[in-house]
Image: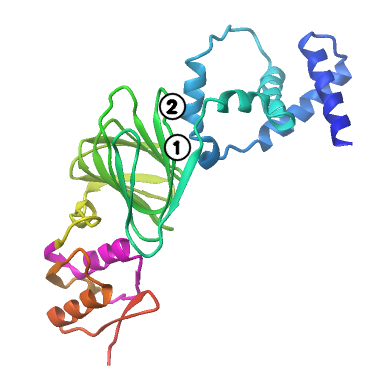
Amino acid sequence: MQQKKSTVLKKLIAKSTKQKTSAKEEKLLHTFFKKMYNQSVWDTNKMGNATFIKDDIRSKIVLKETKSTKTNIYKYAAIAVTILTLGGILLSTYKTNQPSFVTVNTGAAIDSVFLADGSTIYLAPGSSFSYPNTFTNTTREVNLIKGNAFFNIAKNPNKPFIINSGELVTKVLGTSFHIGLQKKESKVSVVTGKVQVNYKNNQQQLVSGQEAVATNNSLRKQKSSVLMTSNWYTKDLNLTEVSLKETLDLLEIKYNVKSAIKNEDVLALKITLFIKQNATLNEIVEQLNYITNLKLLYENEIITLKTN
Protein backbone atom coordinates (compact mmCIF):
# COMPACT_ATOMS: atom_id res chain seq x y z
CA MET A 1 0.00 0.00 0.00
CA GLN A 2 2.81 2.39 0.96
CA GLN A 3 4.66 1.60 -2.27
CA LYS A 4 1.50 2.31 -4.29
CA LYS A 5 1.08 5.69 -2.58
CA SER A 6 4.72 6.52 -3.27
CA THR A 7 4.30 5.70 -6.97
CA VAL A 8 1.18 7.86 -7.26
CA LEU A 9 2.89 10.73 -5.47
CA LYS A 10 5.97 10.56 -7.70
CA LYS A 11 3.75 10.66 -10.79
CA LEU A 12 1.91 13.70 -9.45
CA ILE A 13 5.21 15.46 -8.72
CA ALA A 14 6.45 14.75 -12.23
CA LYS A 15 3.16 15.97 -13.66
CA SER A 16 3.29 19.14 -11.54
CA THR A 17 6.82 20.07 -12.64
CA LYS A 18 5.55 19.97 -16.24
CA GLN A 19 2.58 22.18 -15.21
CA LYS A 20 0.06 19.57 -16.33
CA THR A 21 -1.80 19.09 -13.03
CA SER A 22 -5.38 20.17 -12.45
CA ALA A 23 -6.32 22.71 -9.77
CA LYS A 24 -7.56 19.86 -7.57
CA GLU A 25 -4.28 17.96 -7.95
CA GLU A 26 -2.24 21.09 -7.20
CA LYS A 27 -4.26 21.68 -4.03
CA LEU A 28 -3.68 18.09 -2.96
CA LEU A 29 0.06 18.37 -3.57
CA HIS A 30 0.26 21.71 -1.78
CA THR A 31 -1.45 20.29 1.31
CA PHE A 32 0.85 17.27 1.36
CA PHE A 33 4.03 19.27 0.73
CA LYS A 34 3.20 21.79 3.45
CA LYS A 35 2.68 18.97 5.94
CA MET A 36 5.96 17.28 4.96
CA TYR A 37 7.86 20.57 5.09
CA ASN A 38 6.63 21.37 8.60
CA GLN A 39 7.33 17.84 9.88
CA SER A 40 10.85 17.50 8.49
CA VAL A 41 13.54 17.09 11.16
CA TRP A 42 17.28 17.53 10.79
CA ASP A 43 19.43 15.22 12.94
CA THR A 44 22.66 17.14 13.61
CA ASN A 45 24.54 14.20 15.10
CA LYS A 46 23.88 12.01 12.06
CA MET A 47 23.68 14.58 9.27
CA GLY A 48 25.97 17.38 10.43
CA ASN A 49 25.23 21.03 11.07
CA ALA A 50 22.38 22.08 8.79
CA THR A 51 23.61 25.66 8.33
CA PHE A 52 27.10 24.68 7.23
CA ILE A 53 25.87 21.85 4.98
CA LYS A 54 23.39 24.26 3.38
CA ASP A 55 26.22 26.73 2.70
CA ASP A 56 28.36 23.90 1.32
CA ILE A 57 25.60 22.83 -1.09
CA ARG A 58 24.93 26.42 -2.15
CA SER A 59 28.60 26.92 -2.95
CA LYS A 60 28.40 24.05 -5.44
CA ILE A 61 25.26 25.05 -7.35
CA VAL A 62 23.99 28.07 -9.26
CA LEU A 63 20.41 29.14 -8.62
CA LYS A 64 18.30 30.92 -11.22
CA GLU A 65 15.91 33.42 -9.67
CA THR A 66 12.27 32.99 -10.67
CA LYS A 67 8.99 34.38 -9.44
CA SER A 68 7.34 32.07 -6.92
CA THR A 69 4.25 32.00 -4.77
CA LYS A 70 3.98 30.69 -1.23
CA THR A 71 2.61 27.48 -2.75
CA ASN A 72 5.78 27.02 -4.82
CA ILE A 73 8.00 27.61 -1.78
CA TYR A 74 6.26 24.80 0.05
CA LYS A 75 6.17 22.68 -3.07
CA TYR A 76 9.80 22.76 -4.08
CA ALA A 77 11.15 22.69 -0.52
CA ALA A 78 8.89 19.78 0.30
CA ILE A 79 9.68 17.98 -2.97
CA ALA A 80 13.24 17.68 -1.65
CA VAL A 81 11.95 16.40 1.69
CA THR A 82 9.57 14.01 -0.08
CA ILE A 83 12.32 12.58 -2.27
CA LEU A 84 14.49 12.14 0.82
CA THR A 85 11.65 10.35 2.56
CA LEU A 86 10.60 8.14 -0.36
CA GLY A 87 13.92 7.18 -1.81
CA GLY A 88 16.75 9.02 -0.09
CA ILE A 89 18.01 10.17 -3.49
CA LEU A 90 19.29 13.66 -2.65
CA LEU A 91 20.62 12.71 0.77
CA SER A 92 22.36 9.66 -0.63
CA THR A 93 23.92 11.76 -3.39
CA TYR A 94 25.20 14.34 -0.94
CA LYS A 95 26.23 11.80 1.69
CA THR A 96 28.13 9.61 -0.79
CA ASN A 97 31.16 11.80 -0.25
CA GLN A 98 30.53 12.29 3.46
CA PRO A 99 32.67 10.31 5.94
CA SER A 100 31.33 7.89 8.51
CA PHE A 101 31.48 8.97 12.16
CA VAL A 102 33.22 7.32 15.10
CA THR A 103 31.71 7.78 18.58
CA VAL A 104 33.81 7.73 21.76
CA ASN A 105 32.12 7.28 25.15
CA THR A 106 34.35 7.69 28.20
CA GLY A 107 33.90 5.68 31.37
CA ALA A 108 35.44 6.63 34.70
CA ALA A 109 38.72 7.91 33.27
CA ILE A 110 39.91 10.75 31.04
CA ASP A 111 40.41 9.72 27.42
CA SER A 112 42.00 11.43 24.43
CA VAL A 113 41.24 11.45 20.71
CA PHE A 114 43.85 12.26 18.06
CA LEU A 115 42.30 13.49 14.82
CA ALA A 116 43.68 13.14 11.30
CA ASP A 117 44.35 16.90 11.02
CA GLY A 118 46.67 16.88 14.06
CA SER A 119 44.10 18.15 16.56
CA THR A 120 43.80 16.54 20.00
CA ILE A 121 40.65 16.31 22.12
CA TYR A 122 40.75 15.36 25.80
CA LEU A 123 37.46 13.93 27.06
CA ALA A 124 36.44 14.08 30.71
CA PRO A 125 34.84 11.01 32.35
CA GLY A 126 31.18 10.51 31.43
CA SER A 127 31.52 12.32 28.09
CA SER A 128 30.46 11.38 24.55
CA PHE A 129 32.14 12.64 21.37
CA SER A 130 31.83 11.79 17.67
CA TYR A 131 34.14 12.63 14.77
CA PRO A 132 34.54 11.63 11.09
CA ASN A 133 37.16 9.22 9.79
CA THR A 134 38.12 11.93 7.31
CA PHE A 135 37.15 15.59 7.07
CA THR A 136 35.42 17.20 4.09
CA ASN A 137 37.22 19.58 1.73
CA THR A 138 35.68 22.67 3.35
CA THR A 139 35.31 22.08 7.10
CA ARG A 140 36.41 19.95 10.04
CA GLU A 141 33.19 19.14 11.87
CA VAL A 142 32.74 17.11 15.09
CA ASN A 143 30.10 16.64 17.81
CA LEU A 144 30.41 16.89 21.59
CA ILE A 145 27.27 14.99 22.52
CA LYS A 146 27.57 15.30 26.31
CA GLY A 147 30.06 16.03 29.07
CA ASN A 148 33.27 18.07 29.05
CA ALA A 149 36.19 18.24 26.64
CA PHE A 150 39.36 20.24 26.08
CA PHE A 151 40.16 20.98 22.42
CA ASN A 152 43.67 21.64 21.12
CA ILE A 153 42.98 22.42 17.46
CA ALA A 154 45.57 22.33 14.67
CA LYS A 155 45.58 25.58 12.72
CA ASN A 156 44.15 25.55 9.19
CA PRO A 157 42.79 28.90 7.87
CA ASN A 158 41.19 27.14 4.89
CA LYS A 159 39.25 24.62 6.98
CA PRO A 160 37.41 25.99 10.03
CA PHE A 161 36.92 23.55 12.89
CA ILE A 162 33.27 23.29 13.98
CA ILE A 163 32.00 21.68 17.18
CA ASN A 164 28.27 20.97 17.48
CA SER A 165 27.21 20.75 21.14
CA GLY A 166 23.43 20.57 21.07
CA GLU A 167 22.28 24.08 20.09
CA LEU A 168 25.73 25.47 20.84
CA VAL A 169 28.03 25.74 17.79
CA THR A 170 31.69 26.69 18.20
CA LYS A 171 33.78 27.64 15.16
CA VAL A 172 37.58 28.08 15.18
CA LEU A 173 40.59 28.12 12.86
CA GLY A 174 43.23 26.98 15.35
CA THR A 175 43.20 27.42 19.12
CA SER A 176 42.69 25.68 22.46
CA PHE A 177 39.58 25.85 24.62
CA HIS A 178 37.25 23.99 26.96
CA ILE A 179 33.60 23.11 26.28
CA GLY A 180 31.31 21.95 29.08
CA LEU A 181 27.72 20.76 28.60
CA GLN A 182 25.43 20.74 31.63
CA LYS A 183 21.65 20.47 32.00
CA LYS A 184 21.20 24.10 33.01
CA GLU A 185 24.03 25.73 31.07
CA SER A 186 26.77 25.18 28.53
CA LYS A 187 30.13 26.91 28.54
CA VAL A 188 33.03 27.63 26.15
CA SER A 189 36.27 28.84 27.78
CA VAL A 190 39.17 29.97 25.57
CA VAL A 191 42.82 29.38 26.52
CA THR A 192 44.56 30.49 23.31
CA GLY A 193 43.44 31.97 20.01
CA LYS A 194 39.97 33.14 19.05
CA VAL A 195 36.63 31.35 18.66
CA GLN A 196 33.13 32.17 17.48
CA VAL A 197 30.24 30.79 19.52
CA ASN A 198 26.67 30.59 18.20
CA TYR A 199 23.69 29.71 20.39
CA LYS A 200 20.17 29.97 19.00
CA ASN A 201 19.99 33.58 17.72
CA ASN A 202 23.02 34.79 19.69
CA GLN A 203 26.69 35.06 18.75
CA GLN A 204 29.86 35.91 20.69
CA GLN A 205 33.50 36.32 19.65
CA LEU A 206 35.91 35.10 22.34
CA VAL A 207 39.65 35.51 22.85
CA SER A 208 42.06 34.09 25.42
CA GLY A 209 40.79 34.51 28.98
CA GLN A 210 37.13 34.85 27.99
CA GLU A 211 34.23 32.42 28.07
CA ALA A 212 30.65 32.28 26.80
CA VAL A 213 27.87 30.87 28.97
CA ALA A 214 24.66 29.67 27.30
CA THR A 215 21.55 29.50 29.47
CA ASN A 216 17.92 29.42 28.35
CA ASN A 217 17.86 31.73 25.30
CA SER A 218 20.85 33.91 26.22
CA LEU A 219 24.58 33.80 25.53
CA ARG A 220 26.70 35.99 27.78
CA LYS A 221 30.43 36.71 27.67
CA GLN A 222 32.54 36.89 30.82
CA LYS A 223 36.03 36.36 32.20
CA SER A 224 37.09 32.71 32.20
CA SER A 225 37.40 30.74 35.40
CA VAL A 226 41.06 29.90 35.97
CA LEU A 227 40.18 26.27 36.62
CA MET A 228 38.21 25.87 33.39
CA THR A 229 41.31 26.78 31.39
CA SER A 230 43.72 24.70 33.46
CA ASN A 231 45.33 21.53 32.14
CA TRP A 232 42.95 19.28 34.11
CA TYR A 233 43.33 16.56 31.49
CA THR A 234 47.07 15.76 31.52
CA LYS A 235 49.03 17.44 34.27
CA ASP A 236 49.36 17.86 38.04
CA LEU A 237 47.25 20.77 39.26
CA ASN A 238 48.47 23.46 41.61
CA LEU A 239 45.48 25.42 42.96
CA THR A 240 46.29 28.66 44.75
CA GLU A 241 43.70 30.61 46.74
CA VAL A 242 40.70 29.27 44.84
CA SER A 243 37.26 28.80 46.34
CA LEU A 244 36.02 25.41 47.45
CA LYS A 245 33.19 25.78 44.92
CA GLU A 246 35.64 26.18 42.04
CA THR A 247 37.59 23.19 43.32
CA LEU A 248 34.44 21.05 43.45
CA ASP A 249 33.52 22.20 39.92
CA LEU A 250 36.93 21.03 38.74
CA LEU A 251 36.52 17.66 40.48
CA GLU A 252 33.13 17.28 38.78
CA ILE A 253 34.84 17.56 35.39
CA LYS A 254 37.94 15.53 36.18
CA TYR A 255 36.23 12.71 38.11
CA ASN A 256 32.58 12.88 36.95
CA VAL A 257 31.19 13.41 40.47
CA LYS A 258 28.54 15.73 41.90
CA SER A 259 28.59 17.99 44.94
CA ALA A 260 25.58 18.26 47.24
CA ILE A 261 27.08 21.08 49.32
CA LYS A 262 24.82 24.16 49.42
CA ASN A 263 26.30 26.19 52.29
CA GLU A 264 27.54 29.42 50.67
CA ASP A 265 30.01 30.20 53.45
CA VAL A 266 31.60 26.78 53.08
CA LEU A 267 31.72 27.03 49.29
CA ALA A 268 33.41 30.44 49.53
CA LEU A 269 36.34 29.09 51.58
CA LYS A 270 39.69 29.79 49.89
CA ILE A 271 42.10 26.88 49.60
CA THR A 272 45.53 26.09 48.21
CA LEU A 273 45.85 22.53 47.00
CA PHE A 274 48.20 20.38 44.93
CA ILE A 275 46.53 17.54 42.99
CA LYS A 276 48.72 14.91 41.38
CA GLN A 277 47.62 13.74 37.94
CA ASN A 278 46.93 10.18 39.12
CA ALA A 279 45.45 11.08 42.53
CA THR A 280 42.25 9.26 43.52
CA LEU A 281 39.17 11.22 44.54
CA ASN A 282 39.29 9.78 48.06
CA GLU A 283 42.84 11.09 48.43
CA ILE A 284 41.76 14.57 47.31
CA VAL A 285 38.79 14.60 49.71
CA GLU A 286 41.16 13.68 52.56
CA GLN A 287 43.43 16.58 51.55
CA LEU A 288 40.49 18.99 51.54
CA ASN A 289 39.37 17.83 54.97
CA TYR A 290 42.88 18.32 56.35
CA ILE A 291 43.21 21.83 54.88
CA THR A 292 39.73 23.11 55.79
CA ASN A 293 38.90 21.11 58.95
CA LEU A 294 35.65 20.13 57.23
CA LYS A 295 34.15 16.66 57.14
CA LEU A 296 33.59 16.03 53.44
CA LEU A 297 32.35 12.59 52.47
CA TYR A 298 32.51 10.89 49.09
CA GLU A 299 29.90 8.19 48.57
CA ASN A 300 27.96 6.97 45.51
CA GLU A 301 29.68 9.53 43.24
CA ILE A 302 28.48 12.45 45.40
CA ILE A 303 30.50 14.72 47.70
CA THR A 304 28.59 15.79 50.82
CA LEU A 305 29.34 17.72 54.00
CA LYS A 306 28.87 16.04 57.36
CA THR A 307 27.55 18.64 59.81
CA ASN A 308 27.62 16.74 63.12
Mark 1, residue position: 132
From what the image shows, is residue 88 above or below residue 292? above
Crowd band around label 2 with a 10 angstrom C-alpha radius: few (<14), some (14–19), many (20+): few
Question: For the magenta stretch, what is the residue range?
Answer: 238-263
Mark 2, residue position: 136
x 43%, y 51%: residue: 104
Crowd band around label 1 with a 10 angstrom C-alpha radius: few (<14), some (14–19), many (20+): some
Helix, strand or loop status at disc 2: loop
Q: Return the residue nearer the eye: 96 or 227.
A: 96
Q: Are marks 1 and 2 in contact (CB under 8 Å)?
A: yes
Residue 223 within the segment the image draws in magenta: no
225 left or right, relative to 140: left
Residue 254 within the segment the image draws in magenta: yes
The residues bearing labels 1 and 2 have C-alpha atoms spaced at a distance of 9 Å
235 left or right, relative to 156: left
152 left or right, relative to 276: right
The quadrant the N terminus occupies is top right
